[in-house]
Amino acid sequence: MRNLKRALAALFVLLLAAVVLFFVLENQQGVSLVLFGWSAPAVPVAVVVLAALVMGLVVGSLLGAYGLIRSKHKTRAFVRKEILPGN
């Protein structure tokens, strides 16, 4: 059973890599982004999309970790308040 799970995971990773490669190869036309008057050099569309995806994954992970840490602190503070009501 463990080998089947590993084989399916490997197949999924290979399929995902093939889809990403296909996406990159199909989106080679250049695009130049402009933000507040600053113009970035022309890069392929795939680079822009994949960079946005990676940035979103990083920001989402950081916000999720922040929320988890904050909820743990709130829970600990609540437990301390319930255990030691004099504080």
Image (cartoon, grey):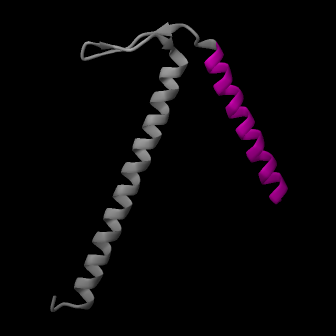
Q: Which residues are magenta?
A: 1-25
Q: Quadrant of residue 59?
A: top left
- The x and y percentages for residue 18 are 71, 27
Compared with 78, 13 (above or below) is: above
Compared with 58, 38 (above or below) is: above
Total marks drawn?
0
Compared with 49, 86 (above or below) is: below
Image-based side of 51 in relation to 5, left or right: left
Q: Quadrant of residue 70?
A: bottom left
Q: Is residue 18 magenta?
A: yes
* Residue located 54% across and 19% down the image: 46
Q: Nearer the viewer, residue 5 or 61?
A: 61
- The x and y percentages for residue 41 are 43, 12
* Residue located 65% across and 15% down the image: 25
- The x and y percentages for residue 84 are 23, 91
Main secondary structure along the magenta-highlighted residues: helix
